[in-house]
Every structure is written in structure tokens, then in C-alpha cells.
Amino acid sequence: MYDRCQAGQGGSPRSTVISSRAGAFDFQGCATYSYSVRDTLTISLPEKTKQLVERAASEGGMTISEFVRLAIFHELWKDATVESRRLAVPVARSRGIFTDEDVFRLIS
């Protein structure tokens, strides 16, 4: 098991907001990976891209695999956020919610 939070990078695994076969993540971006169930994915990269990945992983104190897993997770999270917004905005607008102030007024 790998836990970025143990390295003093903030957050707590107990504040988990999303969990999957790949691991669990909290609001602070800490990752707890469990490797009991995993599959292998092989990718090919241009040499320059591979070097950039290696450097970024090293600078972040991660292995290449950890770096790529986190990058994939971030992309999937971003896609889910965009999809959630795509579905929620029409419903909110139909209910007269257009601005942040409208939201704050409803929850205050």
C-alpha cells in the first residue's frame, strides 16, 4: 500500500470522497492505493514524453506508475466534473438558479 499522506503531503485518508479499484482520494489530493486487485496496462510514449513523465514523477517523489495512475485519475475526475455540470446546469436554470449568489441564497 502507498500513502502520499504519510509523506507529509497533507490531508487524511479518512476524508475520502471517492474510492475505486485504483485507490481512494481525499479533498487534499492524498492518495491511498491498494494493490490487492489490479490489472496491468501497457502504453507506448514518444521518448520526449517518457522523459517528461519520468522527470515529473521524480520531482513529485513518486514512481512512474504512481504518477501515471494519479494523472489518469485526475483526467477521469475532470471528465466526471464536466459531465456533472452538463447534467446539473439545465436543471438549475429551470429552477431559477443562475449565479453563485442564487446558490448561496438557497443554502443560507
Image (cartoon, grey):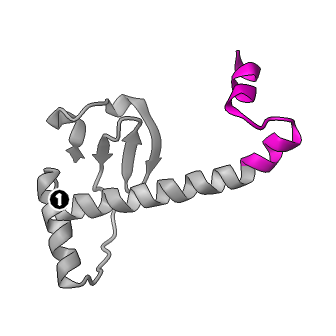
For the C terminus, which image quadrant? Answer: top right
- Residue 95 lies in quadrant: top right
Residue 40 or residue 60, whichever sits in front:
60
Q: Residues within 10 Å of mark 1 (few under 14, many from 20)?
A: some
SS category of the residue bearing label 1: helix
Q: Magenta region's main secondary structure?
A: helix
- Residue 28 lies in quadrant: top left
Q: Position of residue 24 (x, y in %)?
A: 38, 45
Q: Which residues are magenta?
A: 88-108
Image: 81 above or below 11? below
Q: Is residue 108 left or right of residue 54?
A: right
Q: Position of residue 9 (x, y in %)?
A: 21, 35
Q: Is residue 66 left or right of residue 76?
A: left
96 within the magenta span = yes
Q: Is residue 25 left or right of residue 66?
A: right
Q: Position of residue 73 (x, y in %)?
A: 40, 57
- Amino acid at pointer 1: Ala
Q: Residue at label 1?
A: 57
Image: 82 above or below 88? below
